[in-house]
Image (cartoon, helix red, strand yellow):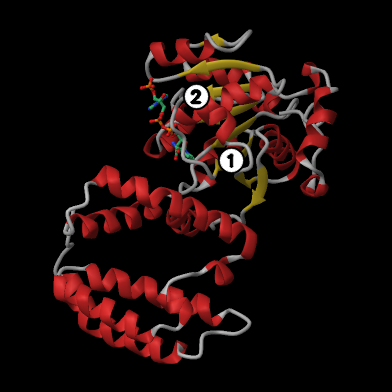
Amino acid sequence: MNPHRAPAAGCAILLLPVQMFRLEQATMSQSSLPRLGFIGAGRLARCLALSFSRAGYPVTAVTSRTAASANRLAGQIAHCAACDDPQQVADAADIIFLAVPDDHIGSAAHTLRFDPATATSPRKALVHCSGASPVELLAPARDQGAAIGGFHPLYLFGGDLADLERIAGCSVTIEADGALKDALTALAVALRCHPLSIPAGGRMLYHAAAHYAASFALCSLAECVALWRTLGFAEDDALRALLPMLAGTIETARDKGLPNALAGPVSRGDTGVVEKQLALLEGLGGDHAALYGLLSRRAVGLAERRATPPAAIEAIAEAVEESLNRSLNQAAAGASVK
Ligand SMILES: NC(=O)c1ccc[n+]([C@@H]2O[C@H](COP(=O)([O-])OP(=O)(O)OC[C@H]3O[C@@H](n4cnc5c(N)ncnc54)[C@H](OP(=O)(O)O)[C@@H]3O)[C@@H](O)[C@H]2O)c1
């Protein structure tokens, strides 16, 4: 990757509106942008490669485990070669995205050869897109003179064209230094995303926590569906009722922040309702009450962050802790629903 060819975008770019940057970038010639290559042509690669190409970046080469995947993606991008071998991608691009399942990142990085004489002029870069795996997995490339980094879009890719629009407004977490950091920041902005920096070594905690805004939000919905099923609600009906409420909650959180968006009995200080719901769920057995109790503990924490917390918040906190004392052992015995 050649820092002189990469779009100039340091920390200051974070302050620029995305549209302004795109306008500036649109006036740059394609030859001033780094050539991009993809190893792996799955859900993430399809969105990134097409989006970068549409933003004016030269996406020069794609390979995948199967020729069919590589051909399908390369066929959608002008002047992009479908390659048989990852090394051909490494040779044809300045920034190479390793977009393979996490378990294959290390082995794929090991197979690539960077000529130390040419890897630094222009400087090549190898980047993976995992949120959890360490960038250090790419160390074999660094040892041969290439820059290494992480580029993790905080977005759940569906694998179809809808991703290209839906990814706008998301964040991309970048772990890199120097010119590569600048180049990856510019690429995040080209996706109409917000660049987010992460310190080295922080990825596993960062990724574990991010589940709460993606898969675990789905798990919360699944718990509600399971409990409503005992009342005779079908899953489709339940989701039709729940998803608009979730969408509204997200909008309120965006407008007011987490403590002020909190609703429900903890937020209102309705101790009686909290106690009755905890007792009801304890009566159902399994881990229902423990899950509800642990999330209620977080709700108490949010309510306490308000300028004026509910007067009954201490009584509610006590009721939640007493219920957790009873329910956590029971939860350890096994899940209520699969
Ligand atoms: N999906 C998401 O929502 C998401 C979000 C953020 C980050 N990520 C990260 O993005 C990376 C890719 O995930 P994904 O969801 O795109 O996975 P995916 O849809 O399963 O695609 C993986 C791709 O890698 C190819 N592949 C598998 N093993 C390979 C190997 N040894 N050499 C070359 N290609 C290989 C597959 O080939 P074939 O198609 O030819 O079988 C497939 O095209 C992962 O690190 C993941 O953590 C994913």
| Callout 1: CB less than 8 Å from ligand 1 | no
Tell me where residue 65 sits by quadrant: top left
Q: Nearer the viewer, residue 6 or 293?
A: 293
State whether residue 258 is above or below residue 269: above
Q: Which residue is mark 1?
A: 151
SS at circle 2: strand
On screen, residue 137 versus residue 124, left or right, reads: left
> Residue at horizontal 46%, vertical 27%?
111
Contact? badges 1 and 2 (CB < 8 Å): no
The spot of residue 112 in percent (x, y) is 51, 26
Q: Nearer the viewer, residue 260 or 320?
A: 260
> Residue at horizontal 37%, vertical 52%?
242
Locate the N terminus and report the quarter of the image it occupies: top right
The spot of residue 256 in percent (x, y) is 63, 64
Q: Quadrant of ligand 1?
A: top left
The spot of residue 241 in percent (x, y) is 36, 50
The spot of residue 238 in percent (x, y) is 30, 50
Q: Which residue is mark 2?
A: 39
